[in-house]
Image: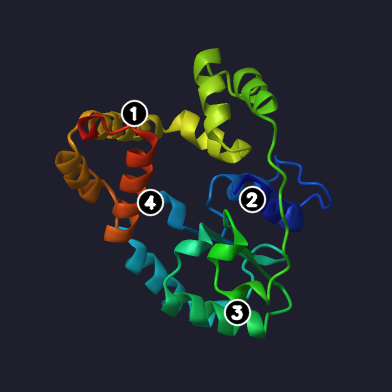
Amino acid sequence: MTLALELAQALNCLMGGKPCGTCLSCRKIADGKHADVQIIDLASDPKGTNRAQKSASIKSGYTVFIEPATFRGRVKIFIINDAERLSSEAANCLLKTLEEPAEKALYLLLSISERLLPLTLVSRCQRLELAPIPAEKIEKALHDTWHIELPKSRLLSRLSRGCLGWAVIASLDKGILEERSLQIEKMLKVCAATWTSALLMLQALLPSSAATVKLFRKFWGYGWIGGMI
């Protein structure tokens, strides 16, 4: 998301060229208030509670996609974060737009892996792969730039999988680490349980029976479920 926003700033910066970060356009984009930069953040809804609503917004905004008239900036930009969470209907609507892209519009689909996106969408996009940033550099940036205490910076840098943007967001949202601690606590309970109890616990934690069986067999193979022996 960080790079996507900076690209939006570069294309609409009032100073031209490299984004200045201080003009009205750059500030509005950074604050998420620019009329020509629309963000659909599916990542902010990891449990999928509002997925249907957000996907519907793409479908209902199809006319905006095909007629992307700018209000203030030079280029209209649509950023879809965690694009792999798009419903099939929303992806099909977006596909129609990508088949005949407008001249002054840019569509940014952010995803952890292109393999999670429909092939039809991938075939119509220009792929940009970002190499992961070393954990040591992320730790230093969190501590020096965002003034995060060292223990937390070290933890977030190792959880980020090389993504500085995620680490920064996680440093500001305490709920992310709290959810991680909760999930670890639940998994430790699974490891200490008998096999019948462990299976029931995994069924409550995982989204499908297939995922439950797969993880259960892995735990069993590693000897992590103590009640089995």
Q: CA distance from mark 2 to mark 3?
A: 25 Å
- Tell me if I can see residue 55 in this picture: yes
Of the residues under marks 1 and 4, which one precedes in the sequence? Answer: 4
Callout 2, which amino acid? Leu
How far apart marks 3 and 4 lie (CA) works out to 24 Å
Q: Nearer the viewer, mark 4 or mark 2?
A: 4
First-in-chain label (4 vs 2): 2
Which residue carries the number 1 mark?
Answer: 181
Q: Are marks 3 and 1 in contact (CB under 8 Å)?
A: no
Drawn side of residue 100 relative to residue 171, left or right? right
- Give, as a three-letter code, the residue at label 4: Pro
Foreground residue, 202 or 29?
A: 202
At a point 29% along the width and 52% down the height, the residue shown is: 212
Residue depth check, mark 2 versus mark 3: number of the one nearer the observer: 3
> Where does label 3 land, which residue?
120
**Residue 5 image label:** 2
Q: Position of residue 145 (x, y in %)?
A: 64, 23
